[in-house]
Amino acid sequence: MVTLLDYGAGNVRSVVNAIKNLGYAVRLVERPEDILAAEKLIFPGVGAFGSMMRVLHQKGFVQPLRRYLEQDRPFLGICLGLQALFQASEEAPEEEGLGFLKGMARRFRVDLAVPHIGWNGIKPRKPSALFQGLTGEEKLYFVHSYHVDPEDAGVVLTTTDYGVEFVSAVQKGRVAAVQFHPEKSGPTGLKILQNFLEGSQALSVLPPRAPARTHLTKRIIACLDVRTNDQGDLVVTKGDQYDVREKGQVRNLGKPVDLARRYYEQGADEITFLNITGFRDFPLMDVPMLEVLRRTSENVFVPLTIGGGIRDYVDKDGTAYSALDVAAAYFRSGADKVSIGSDAVLIVEEVLRTGKATGRSAIETISRIYGSQAVVISIDPRRVYVPSPTAVPHRVIETALPGPQGERYCWYQCTVKGGREGRPLDAITLAQVCEQLGAGEILLNCIDRDGTNSGFDVELIQAVKEAVTIPIIASSGAGCAEHFLEVFTRTKAESALAAGIFHRNEVPIGAVKAYLQGKVPIRPVP
Ligand code: 1PR
């Protein structure tokens, strides 16, 4: 029996599912005394340091946790569960950590995108039971903006490179904690969890190979656009330039849960579900999407993002739900990140009109509680050609692909409601303001390229990438493996997403990765 400390933020469902998948029963901590009664304790922290510590105090968990740690009992901290072991964090200087280890969590100060999101390696520093069966060359999934800085070098278990060499795992006696997410790191992560669950100190090993340097890999993401078809079934569909109908019928490319599982097995680094009619339906009533997440997270152990309908909503009977309520329902069902589309455009328009942020927008409220890494902004822009850089009051770029009248300039107009309505806002400005409001990542679609197999719009991707410091997911237009290499070499995008070629089995994920191997850092298919 393993005990899991769930303090109510983020996605503990995946950890529970991973443990169950390994054949163990899980008990959740409900009262402070459950902590000291645990045989083995896992503390998966997700969200922001300050809110985590406040909740731990409110629930009376801090003292029993400190005692459990001091008694040197089996403990595995994950992500914030690692940072919580230290005295403090720059993320919330007013909150004290558990103080089991001396030192603090510091924000990344690197010339790279922050948060550090994606699959990176580890460099083991000392033997541990957690390393049994590992080669040392595995990739693990990270998502964080802060890293720990221990005073005692003796507690360092692994380090990882990301602009700086940071501590990615610690161990002191039977207390271990990792910055990466084993429950989101595919078969390697499950192996580490299994090692903890079965582990004995006597079996400590060092992996046979340790990389001299680790690299954040480029992520390959499979995207599932989901909606109800005319027969009432929830299906994965795919459009051409956002038109998902063929001969009047919604294209049916398969069942969401089955396809997600297939892409996981094929080596997808992440899976995104977009509820493409979420702007119409009330998503909390949209039980099928929650069910899709619940079922997918039972046996898919890579990050899951869900988008569509993340916004404030007033029900027919006048009951108000906040975007935070909607997001919370998705996180509880297995999502690691939520993606905000139409609402982000309206939020940014409001900020630009009034000159200030309200603090109450979906982006701000969700990132405050769940952390910026949990908030993705999905942009659906359309290219608009103009004759000169000053023809419109928007961010215009010079293009190598002239327009129908020979125009050498264009801007990227944001749209809402799945491309149905253009707005007077450009994609670059939208991305910048969303970053300021607390968004952690940009999913950059392009309606002109969507479903065309003609390659990513590298001009758009580079223009947005240069304007923000958060990671970018390049999306729309992938038609072959070479298009992924093009987007990774001609732009600094951290990841690339595709839908149609994967759904139609034209280019499987494994073929994309095999082609990229040795050309850009990539997580090999496990
Ligand atoms: O506005 O917050 O409710 O979110 C709705 C979400 O649904 C947005 O993220 C929006 O991008 C998405 N969406 C809305 N309508 C459509 C549609 O296709 N009619 N899908 C749609 C957008 C675009 C990509 C696609 C890539 C790759 N899909 O995610 O998967 O373009 O496709 P490809 O590789 O086949 O070219 P809200």
Image (cartoon, rainbow, N blue to C red):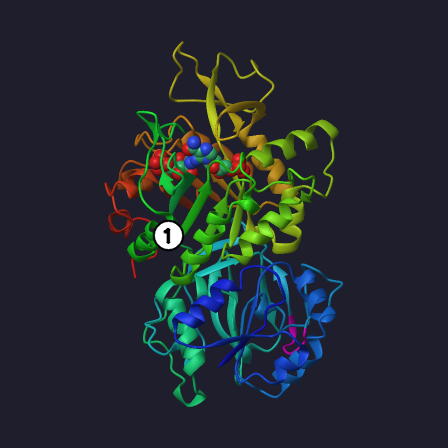
In the foreground, 397 or 508: 508
- Residue 287: give x, y in percent of width and height: 50, 49
Give the residue displayed 42% in from the left and 90% down from the top. 202
Q: Is 188 left or right of 38, judged from the image as shown?
A: left
- The crowding category of the residue bearing disc 1, from other C-alpha atoms within 10 Å (few below 14, some 14 to 19, many at least 20), is many
Give the residue displayed 69% in from the left and 31% down from the top. 350
Magenta-drawn stretch, dominant element (helix, strand or loop): loop
Q: Which residues are magenta?
A: 98-103
Image quadrant in which you'd find residue 209: bottom left
- Residue 270: give x, y in percent of width and height: 41, 52
Give the residue displayed 69% in from the left and 33% down from the top. 351
The quadrant in which the C terminus is found is: bottom left
Q: Residue furthest top?
A: 405
Image quadrant in which you'd find residue 483: top left
Q: Residue furthest right?
A: 94
- Which kind of residue does numbered mark 1 sit on? Val
Q: Which residue is mark 1?
A: 257
Tell me, yes or no, if residue 490 can be seen here.
no
